[in-house]
Image (cartoon, coloured by chain):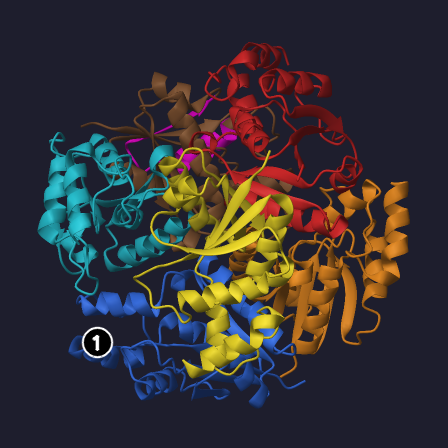
Chain colours: A yellow, B cyan, C brown, D red, E blue, F orange
Amino acid sequence: MSKTVICPGSFDPVTLGHVDIITRASKMFDKVIVAVLVNSSKTPSFSIEERIELLQDSTCGIENVEVVSFNGLLAEYCRERKVDAIVKGLRAVTDFEYEFQMALTNKKLNPMLETIFLTADADSMYLSSSMVREVASMGGDISNFVPKCVHQRIVERLNKG
Amino acid sequence: MSKTVICPGSFDPVTLGHVDIITRASKMFDKVIVAVLVNSSKTPSFSIEERIELLQDSTCGIENVEVVSFNGLLAEYCRERKVDAIVKGLRAVTDFEYEFQMALTNKKLNPMLETIFLTADADSMYLSSSMVREVASMGGDISNFVPKCVHQRIVERLNKG
Amino acid sequence: MSKTVICPGSFDPVTLGHVDIITRASKMFDKVIVAVLVNSSKTPSFSIEERIELLQDSTCGIENVEVVSFNGLLAEYCRERKVDAIVKGLRAVTDFEYEFQMALTNKKLNPMLETIFLTADADSMYLSSSMVREVASMGGDISNFVPKCVHQRIVERLNKG
Amino acid sequence: MSKTVICPGSFDPVTLGHVDIITRASKMFDKVIVAVLVNSSKTPSFSIEERIELLQDSTCGIENVEVVSFNGLLAEYCRERKVDAIVKGLRAVTDFEYEFQMALTNKKLNPMLETIFLTADADSMYLSSSMVREVASMGGDISNFVPKCVHQRIVERLNKG
Amino acid sequence: MSKTVICPGSFDPVTLGHVDIITRASKMFDKVIVAVLVNSSKTPSFSIEERIELLQDSTCGIENVEVVSFNGLLAEYCRERKVDAIVKGLRAVTDFEYEFQMALTNKKLNPMLETIFLTADADSMYLSSSMVREVASMGGDISNFVPKCVHQRIVERLNKG
Amino acid sequence: MSKTVICPGSFDPVTLGHVDIITRASKMFDKVIVAVLVNSSKTPSFSIEERIELLQDSTCGIENVEVVSFNGLLAEYCRERKVDAIVKGLRAVTDFEYEFQMALTNKKLNPMLETIFLTADADSMYLSSSMVREVASMGGDISNFVPKCVHQRIVERLNKG
């Protein structure tokens, strides 16, 4: 039974919480597609190319992970790529409610598509990309929040912007 | 005891969830005013006129429903129109908290005004206007989410915009 | 459109929060049945007869209220009595979740039966029968928590027991 | 990558919600162990043997499902049986909080053990074993709540008890 | 043991809920710094100077309160000012989740910094600055929502804007 | 400004989460009373004397902590002992709702009594006395959940019982 899952998100930028979820998914399933959502309506802090590169470097030790960008409907993209399940990390109740709604919507759009939730690690429960951006933009130390190998690049990029 | 209730909202656009709540309210109360909120600060996808027309067509079989637009303070509008209660559908916990705050505020502004909650149908629990807009804008199928009689017009309108 | 609603509960004993919900329901609907649940599995502090009497005295000024006890399935009892809707007060999120489940179950058992929620008054948001019992059993003052006309009887009864 | 997961629970009795989660798990993973918890402190309505039999009959069409009972620490049992992940269905926020606590505890006791959540189907969101017992004990119709093939036996058993 | 706490916020504008929290903090701790956050990304309705003045007038009877503005990282500002704890009012569950995340982040950034929560008074549970702005902008009466001594100025300012 | 606070609870038995909250309270306030609730209705696993002794040993390095037992109404006991505030740790949303209700009740019973919440440490967010009892009773390792100095005694006691 070979199974492919997808971890979709904005990853603007990647955090240690994202890497935790991707790593755990890679141990449970045969292939993990990390999919950076191209959302034309929001102005991201990092370009699609930067976000992909940071994710690739943060997961370079994991063989069955592929980083891609995608545009359009997630349920449709999953059909094309023969994805069996969406994997999401849950940090808190408000996360849960939104993700619950998304899971039911995606199932309606693609009845074969499963959504699987992993609970965030106790250490990354408070972590979010927006908090990383906020702390870094005010000169705070984000070394506990992002992967070591991309820390320097994220700091430099957020200080420029 | 003749009772008038109001279903306020943005309805941008109407969903099957809205129609479910309006229909059920129309069975409990003598008159149901469906009130489209004119909110100058947000840019809606559908104009006020379009939203009213879609609502009228979606509720055309229900005699005691009137569709209007309104501007200003809901509590004040309810006083003018002699509305006895606001009727809202609850989908989830986050809905509940916001609506709870609104209900207490409206009671403070108009102590005679009651707020009544109906739980969303299991089938429409995940439905929201923003999800309909998002799915449609990416070419997804929204026929399970909006009333049949306005489906085509909503699709065309969201594809143009 | 003549409408009958039911306010079910244990009422062990009645609190000011219950009276608030019953009073508001009596202003919205033609008839309000207050139904004391006979639950054989729990040992109540007040007998069915005591609970009915306390409720009758607490609502004696409201003409369209009837106090009854009932046994068995609420959905079935509502069918027999031609009840149009169940009315429940919501105090908090945990309330909401349980009541949500009950509302969906009752709809499955009796598709014509509506459940309507009113938000607890800011002043009774913390009130529950169990808290009244707990405070009174330790000699605390419950005069802010229960109707004036039954206060003395509740205190005496809880001190004896 | 061959993966074994476990669906632990009381299953007192099995509901359509349980069968939905077990079925979906069986499509994602190579082997699904359905584990009936022997909890000496609670008095169940169905014996361990009855619960196992009802589960076996409800999942008899699914090849990679095994029904067992277990006693003691789940994290320890998972180590012995080489289970890769616990699979749980989430119905609501209160579920989520308790399950979240359990998932963190189990990870502390067995760091290799993953917990995976699936969202309940919209149709089974309100379903629980205790609600089935309650409705059946009052003579209500539970045919929408439990698997067809065990419906008759559950009704008879709950009427006797 | 002399303790300094900080009440950070946007205060756009001050509400009776803010004054309740500040007053209660001033009774528990030796010094209370009320810190208006200078957030360059949002466009506030009141200028920093106006917000400080309204806060000063609303708390002028409390000796151990100092009103300041601050820019940058709260955890860093607390280090500079030797603040022992952040004090926040909690109104509801969604508040709680966000504040929980903030508290854990601030502790990571400054391990000596404590976050303390007070529950909002039953009367101010529904109060927020955005609701005050919304009600006032539509000509509603906000006299129950803001301190008496600044009511007139807030109304005039929001009508002009 | 000399302030006395109280940490009430069952402490059946003390966990690392309790010690974290007590320690942090002892740094913020002049005196911390740890009060073991004598609850006649529940059958505890540890006697009052055992619970007090375990707490005393777990907090023996903190000078301004006193461990007591108390019976009756907390709000009344706080009045007698001139306690300024109740201090509680919050782990999760369900905690929050119950504690919120308790805080409002206690304020009604004793308007001078404040309730202060601290967020549980990320590491103790999943910890509860009941989970410690459950894990230990099944032979699981609880060394990560309880203070080192009382670990052996808790294990022995729970194995005997």
**Observer-nearest residue: A79 or E76?**
A79
Residue beneath the point at 78% across and 53% down: F13
**Observer-nearest residue: C59 or D139?**
D139
Query: Can see residue B134?
Result: yes
The percent position of residue D102, horizontal first and vertical second, equals: 66, 46
Horizontal side of D58 relative to E98 (left or right) equals: right
Residue beneath the point at 42% across and 70% down: A46
State whether residue A31 is above or below residue C60: below
Identified by mark 1, the residue type is Leu
Query: Can see residue C132?
Result: no
Image quarter (top left, top right, bottom left or bottom right) of the N terminus of chain D: top right
Residue beneath the point at 51% across and 14% down: D148
Q: Is mark 1 on a helix, strand or loop?
A: helix
> Residue C7 sits in which quadrant?
top left
State whether residue F113 is above or below residue F129: below
- B68 magenta-colored: no
Q: Mark 1 lies on which chain?
A: E
**Observer-nearest residue: C140 or E72?**
E72
The percent position of residue C161, horizontal first and vertical second, equals: 64, 37
Image quarter (top left, top right, bottom left or bottom right) of the C terminus of chain D: top right
The percent position of residue A15, horizontal first and vertical second, equals: 54, 65
> Residue D88 sits in which quadrant?
top right
| Neighbourhood count class around disc 1 (C-alpha, 10 Å): few under 14, some 14–19, many 20 upward | some
The percent position of residue E69, horizontal first and vertical second, equals: 42, 87
Residue range in magenta is C49-70
Q: Name the residue under label 1.
A: E158
- C54 magenta-colored: yes
State whether residue C161 is above or below residue E119: above
State whether residue D28 is above or below residue F141: above
> Residue B59 sits in which quadrant?
top left
